[in-house]
Amino acid sequence: MKKILITRKLIKDSEDKAQKIFEVKLNSNDELYSQAKLIELTQGCDGILTSLTEKMDADAINKLPKSIKIISNFAVGFGNIDLEAAKKRGIAVTNTPEVLSDATAEIGILLILGACRRASEGIDAARLSNWKWSADYLIGKQLTRSRLGILGMGRIGQKIAKIAKSLGMIIHYHNRSKLSADKEQGAIYHDSLKSLFSVSDVLSICCPATKETVNLINKQTIEYFPTGAVITNVARGDIVDDEALIDALNRRKIYAAGLDVYKNEPNLNPGYLKIKSAFILPHLGSATKDTRIAMANLAIDNIDEFFNTGNCKNIVN
Ligand code: NAP
């Protein structure tokens, strides 16, 4: 029986499933392991089931025992793992695509609604009972007939596009490659960031965090947007230069921001705290019970498939 380390506590059904297939080292206290402790715990293991809280950089990967053949990440994103370093060590890295797309798209839409319709301010006022209705009280931005720019029209981006279209938004997108017409569903392709941003009344960031996308939203690219645009990010914090976005919010170049993710989670850049139009969530994209179980089951199945066949359809390196 193969032996695996599961670095974070999973929903019980998933831990039970893993224990039927593997000899498992669980983390019942859901402790955040230091790199040194994680490496120590992998001794004697054949695989690791990691979460985005484990930073598997080259240094950590090079210290893993030779017995480790797979790192199965409990996420579709894999910015926490150095794929090249793993490849050099002959370690396969897998992810959990598709099963979390619906739940994450829901949060993507919540960010758009929350930022455009001033939900943070509204919630604060309602809780304090200190508001008074008037014809111009907490006027927000209407989604109907607004242009939604999607940066990264992949699995999640396409689902957000479909829901946003049903809300009356006009969809534009940028990927490095244009999609086929059946995937585009009438969305308008832009071959550059500048072209997309210049028509985005609202932006939804849905691309992965990679070397190419780090700080794509920065001092220079923010100027491409129409004044009063809204920027939302359901992908990864690394894609946004927070200082540049905070500055643009303060000078009202950008009307509002909706963020499910941000740099240095869980520590929010304090600059956002003073901005009433910032609608910010604590990385809730895939946080539904069904989705978390489906993700964990897929992460377990990825390891099983890998050890049974020597391959796995969800290898990303
Ligand atoms: P996906 O299907 O691979 O889609 C990613 C899209 O981004 C593709 O259309 C890709 O098109 C585009 N892209 C990649 N690099 C790009 C670049 N340099 N410039 C412009 N577009 C680029 O991935 P997904 O399943 O939709 O997930 C997307 C991301 O969402 C994940 O990587 C993850 O970080 C994040 N996520 C967050 C949460 C959360 O809890 N908030 C949950 C799930 C996922 P091209 O290859 O043609 O460029």
Image (cartoon, rainbow, N blue to C red):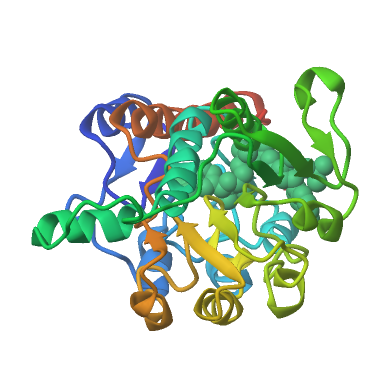
33 relative position to 301: left or right: left
Residue 220 image point, x, y percent:
76, 77
* Ligand 1 image position (quadrant): top right
Q: Which quadrant would the N terminus be assigned to in this image?
A: top left
Residue 19 image point, x, y percent:
29, 31
Residue 137 image point, x, y percent:
31, 56
295 relative position to 243: left or right: left
Note whether residue 187 is visible: yes
Q: Quadrant of residue 183?
A: top right
Q: Residue furthest top?
A: 182
Judging depth in this view, the residue of 238 and 225 nearest the camera is 225
Judging depth in this view, the residue of 195 and 205 nearest the camera is 195
126 relative position to 293: left or right: left
Above or below for 299 versus 152: above
Residue 162 image point, x, y percent:
61, 25
Q: Residue furthest front?
A: 135
